[in-house]
Amino acid sequence: MSSAKPQPALFLSKVERRYPQGEGFLEVLRGADLVIWPGEIVALIAPSGTGKSTLLHVAGLLEKPDGGEVYVGAQPTSGMGDHERTRIRREELGFVYQFHHLLPEFSALENVVMPQLIRGLPKAEAQDRAKQLLTFLGLGKRLTNRPGELSGGEQQRVAIARAVANAPRVLLADEPTGNLDPNTADRVFQTLVAIVRASKLAALIATHNLDLAARMDRRVTIRDGLIVQLP
Ligand SMILES: Nc1ncnc2c1ncn2[C@@H]1O[C@H](COP(=O)(O)OP(=O)(O)OP(=O)(O)O)[C@@H](O)[C@H]1O
């Protein structure tokens, strides 16, 4: 019988992060623990200034923790060099931000094809996958439009397709619907959840929107530098 233990998609173990402040340090994360399992969508609801961006930066390997460890799948990352961290970011993590950061000169399709080419996929394969994703997200008729020709909600759906194009292990999203009106935010959120579920990813989604958070699998916050589970 197989004794393989289930493996978290993302595991933050006793993560510390501090910034110089005056003579001393501001301790933003003081030993934060967070496990996200494959297929789980976790809401991060944290008041401004408590360390939400810091946590996402550390989880996304954009900043190194001052203590503790970040595991992406089974891989501990703190001992890795920049090259390896960049590879993990490109291949195993997907990012969605409040503002989409799409390339304005490129079509919706090209924006989703690009990260796959950078990863080394053949062009035809990358295009097929990009078309499938954009069609799944309701943009099948908008493939050749540039971001400037798309609505805010459509742009954000292209950004979601781009983030999941390389089938990452974990999707990290910072206020992905924060820039949209409530109805559009709701629709974009539904497509985000649908694609995360369909692709069996794990997701950590920072949001101030409690209605959206209530529809995720689990909710956490940051209190005194620690991750605390919410009901
Ligand atoms: N590079 C830095 N140098 C010094 N202090 C920093 C740095 N980055 C963040 N901080 C401080 O760390 C604390 C947490 O910042 P962080 O950006 O993680 O908060 P946040 O919860 O994301 O807030 P918001 O929701 O307003 O973006 C803040 O007090 C901030 O001023």
Image: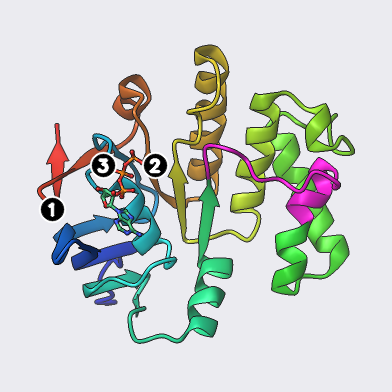
Residue bounds of the magenta highlight: 97-113
Cα separation between marks 2 and 3: 17 Å
Horizontal relation, residue 141 to residue 164: left or right: right
Q: Residues within 10 Å of mark 2 (few under 14, many from 20)?
A: many
Q: Quadrant of residue 77?
A: bottom left
What's under tag 3, amino acid-wise? Gly
Nearer to us in this view, 229 or 63: 63
Looking at the rendered image, the quarter that the C terminus falls into is: top left
Does the magenta portion include 88?
no
Looking at the rendered image, the quarter that the N terminus falls into is: bottom left
- In the displayed structure, 67 sits above or below 167; it is below
The x and y percentages for residue 20 are: 23, 65
- In the displayed structure, 97 sits above or below 148; it is below
> Disc 1 marks which residue?
226
Which mark is first along the chain, 1 or 2?
2
Cα separation between marks 2 and 1: 17 Å
Residue 104 visible: yes
Q: Does the numbered disc 3 mark a residue whose Cβ is under 8 Å from ligand 1?
A: yes
> Disc 3 marks which residue?
49
Nearer to us in this view, 15 or 42: 15
Horizontal relation, residue 26 to residue 73: left or right: left
Identify which residue is drawn at 38% across, 25% down. Answer: 212
Q: Quadrant of residue 31?
A: bottom left
Looking at the image, which residue sits at the far left? 224
